[in-house]
């Protein structure tokens, strides 16, 4: 079956999620520290950035686990 997403973008997507999530979380944290208080917007940016980074990391780990298992299955077949 032909893949609809180019391989470069498919491989880069979890890293992009983690990078954008980390940038949002760090940016919201530094913004709140410079202002001296948290607002709803900054809290939302911080939590959504952390969630985006976790989703990217989980996606990357699931892909690595799947590839390792399917390679093992291919080698294990008689």
Image: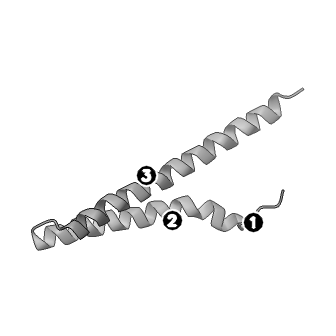
Q: In this rendered view, identify the residue nearer to me: 41 or 74.
A: 41
- Residue name at image x 69 percent, y 36 percent: 69
Which circle marks residue 16 in the picture?
Answer: 2
Look at the numbered disc 3 and give the secondary structure of its residue: helix
Look at the numbered disc 1 and give the secondary structure of its residue: loop
Q: CA distance from mark 2 to mark 1?
A: 19 Å
Q: Which residue is mark 3?
A: 54
Look at the numbered disc 2 and give the secondary structure of its residue: helix
Res 27 quadrant in image? bottom left
Location of the N terminus (image quadrant): bottom right
- Total numbered labels placed on residues in the image: 3
Q: CA distance from mark 1 to mark 3?
A: 25 Å
Q: Is residue 20 above or below residue 57?
A: below
Of the two numbered discs 2 and 1 on the same chain, state the one appearing first in sequence. 1
- Residue name at image x 90 percent, y 26 percent: 78
- Residue name at image x 59 percent, y 64 percent: 12
Residue 22's x, y, as percent? 37, 62
Q: CA distance from mark 3 to mark 2?
A: 12 Å
Disc 3 residue crowd, few under 14, some 14–19, many 20+, Cα 10 Å: some
Q: Is residue 51 above or below residue 71?
A: below
Relative to 29, is 37 on the left or the right?
left
Of the two numbered discs 3 and 2 on the same chain, state the one appearing first in sequence. 2
Label 1 close to label 3 by CB (< 8 Å): no
Q: Which residue is mark 1?
A: 4
- Residue name at image x 36 percent, y 61 percent: 48
Relative to 48, is 9 on the left or the right?
right
């Amino acid at each position: 079956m032909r893949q609809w997403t180019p391989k470069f973008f498919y491989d880069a997507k979890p890293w992009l999620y983690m990078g954008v999530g980390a940038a949002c979380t760090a940016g919201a944290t530094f913004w709140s520290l410079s202002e001296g208080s948290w607002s709803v917007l900054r809290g939302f940016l911080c939590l959504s950035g952390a969630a985006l980074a976790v989703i990217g990391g989980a996606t990357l780990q699931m892909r690595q686990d799947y590839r390792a298992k399917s390679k093992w299955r291919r080698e294990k077949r008689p």
